[in-house]
Image (cartoon, rainbow, N blue to C red):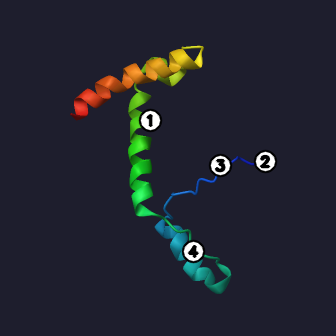
Amino acid sequence: MASVPTCGIAHTIPEKADQQRHRYNRGRHAGRPAGINRQIYRRRNMIERCFNRLKGFRGIATRYEKTAASYEAAVTLATLPLWARSV
């Protein structure tokens, strides 16, 4: 499996309750729990929801635009109605 470059970005994925119980049951061999920064996770959640809304636009989801500039323009145009609804 190829390694993915992280660019120095730490993960902010919270640990599930069943994983916490599993670590507790394993005792001292379970390892350290993953830390989570709640402020960063809230911002990540906001971005993930934005991506999900953008996928509602067929041209964005399937990436009909061939060049990066036209795709960026399409994403910008697609975000305008989303922004207008939130205001």
- Which numbered tag is attached to residue 7? 3
* Residues tagged 3 and 1 counted as in contact (Cβ below 8 A): no
Label 1, on which residue? Answer: 51
Q: Position of residue 10 (x, y in %)?
A: 58, 57
Q: Whole-Å distance between the Cαs marked 3 and 2?
A: 18 Å
* Foreground: disc 4 or disc 2: 2
* Foreground: disc 3 or disc 4: 3
* Foreground: disc 1 or disc 2: 1
Q: Position of residue 25 (x, y in %)?
A: 58, 81
Tell me where residue 75 sits by quadrant: top left
Nearest to N terminus: mark 3 or mark 4: 3
At mark 2, the secondary structure is loop
* Foreground: disc 4 or disc 1: 1
Q: Position of residue 44 (x, y in %)?
A: 44, 49
Nearest to N terminus: mark 4 or mark 2: 2
**What residue type is disc 4 on?**
His
Q: Residue at x 51, y 69 (%)?
A: 18
**What residue type is disc 2 on?**
Met
Q: Whole-Å distance between the Cαs marked 3 and 1?
A: 21 Å
The residue positioned farthest toward the right in the image shown:
1
Q: Position of residue 39 (x, y in %)?
A: 40, 59
At mark 1, the secondary structure is helix
The residue positioned farthest toward the bottom in the image shown:
28
- Which numbered tag is attached to residue 22? 4
Nearest to N terminus: mark 4 or mark 1: 4
Q: Whole-Å distance between the Cαs marked 4 and 2?
A: 26 Å
**What residue type is disc 1 on?**
Phe
Q: Residue at x 64, y 78 (%)?
A: 30
Q: Whole-Å distance between the Cαs marked 4 and 1?
A: 32 Å
- Which numbered tag is attached to residue 1? 2
- Which numbered tag is attached to residue 9? none
**What residue type is disc 3 on?**
Cys
